[in-house]
Image (cartoon, rainbow, N blue to C red):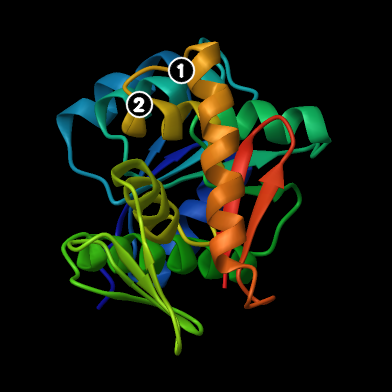
């Protein structure tokens, strides 16, 4: 039976009760919170696999809560529930640490698919953290020896190229913020390092351009998504 532990934050009592009971009927273990001020105390007292957050909440909004949760547990997936999905809302949500959005009203099946998708990506990422090699379609990436191989070429990577490519691979298909990349690769997000990141992204794109199915997509105002 599914024992995925969900922290579900929703102030609409009727909707929340329906969603909670429906998820529990599928085997999920659901803790529901209705007040934004009670989320962090609840989160710190128990272990959760994923968070589902409404954005508009009494006491404290979902964006603030997501930022606080990610400061404690950076890897936990967060799904935002919202009545509006404008570009500005998406940018704010991703910057706050959100991994996915669902627009209200939504179906239970859609919610479950998104939950399972995020958890699967998390499991793959955990498994891949120490991998010796990664297949990137026609490329093979060897992070421990700083090399990217094609069928007829070996590309020697610098340390930062290597670390950046590994970070992108581990977050495959996710929206990964510029600030997260800068903090992990350079140690801070100063303007000078931000310009350096642009240079390194260009270099990696040049290395990967022989395969059109491998792309580093720029997400304006957010960061990048690596797809292959």
In this rendering, position of residue 44 left or right of residue 197: left
Crowd band around label 2 with a 10 angstrom C-alpha radius: few (<14), some (14–19), many (20+): some
Give coordinates of residue 124: x percent, y percent. Answer: 31, 69
Residue at the (16%, 29%) spot, across then down: 45
* Label 1: which secondary element: loop
Residue 55 at least partly seen: no
Q: Looking at the rendering, in which quadrant would you find the N terminus? A: bottom left
222, 200: nearer the viewer: 200
In this rendering, position of residue 199 left or right of residue 184: right
Give coordinates of residue 178: x percent, y percent. Answer: 54, 31
The residue singled out by tag 1 in the image is: 189
Residue 181 at least partly seen: yes
* Label 2: which secondary element: loop
Crowd band around label 1 with a 10 angstrom C-alpha radius: few (<14), some (14–19), many (20+): some
18, 144: nearer the viewer: 144
Res 107 → quadrant: bottom right
Residue at the (33%, 32%) spot, across then down: 184
Residue at the (27%, 30%) spot, across then down: 43
Total count of labels: 2
108 relative to 80, above or below:
below
187 relative to 167, above or below:
above
Res 185 → quadrant: top left
The residue singled out by tag 2 in the image is: 186
Residue at the (43%, 55%) spot, across then down: 171
103, 175: nearer the viewer: 175
205, 73: nearer the viewer: 205
Give coordinates of residue 103: x percent, y percent. Answer: 74, 48
Label 2 – label 1 distance at C-alpha: 7 Å
Q: Looking at the rendering, in which quadrant would you find the C terminus? A: bottom right
Circles 2, 1 touching at the beta carbon (< 8 Å): yes
Residue at the limit of the structure toward the bottom, as seen here: 151
In this rendering, position of residue 165 left or right of residue 59: left
């Amino acid at each position: 039976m599914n024992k995925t532990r969900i922290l579900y934050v929703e102030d609409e009592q009727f909707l929340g009760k329906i969603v909670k009971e429906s998820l529990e009927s599928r085997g999920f273990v659901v803790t529901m919170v209705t007040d934004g001020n009670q989320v962090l105390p609840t989160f710190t007292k128990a272990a959760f696999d994923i968070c589902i957050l409404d954005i508009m909440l009494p006491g404290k909004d979902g964006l603030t809560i997501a930022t606080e949760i990610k400061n404690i547990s950076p890897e936990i997936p967060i799904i935002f529930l919202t009545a509006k999905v404008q570009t500005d809302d998406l940018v704010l949500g991703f910057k706050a640490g959100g991994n996915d959005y669902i627009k209200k009203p939504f179906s239970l099946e859609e919610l479950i698919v998104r939950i399972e998708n995020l958890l699967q990506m998390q499991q793959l990422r955990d498994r891949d953290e120490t991998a010796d090699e990664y297949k990137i379609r026609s490329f093979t990436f060897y992070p421990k020896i700083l090399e990217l191989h094609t069928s007829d070429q070996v590309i020697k990577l610098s340390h930062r190229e290597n670390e950046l490519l590994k970070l992108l691979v581990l977050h495959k298909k996710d929206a990964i913020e510029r600030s997260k990349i800068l903090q992990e690769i350079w140690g801070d997000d100063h303007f000078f390092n931000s310009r350096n990141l642009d240079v390194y992204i260009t270099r990696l794109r040049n290395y990967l351009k022989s395969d059109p199915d491998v792309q580093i997509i720029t997400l304006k105002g957010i960061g990048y998504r690596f797809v292959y």
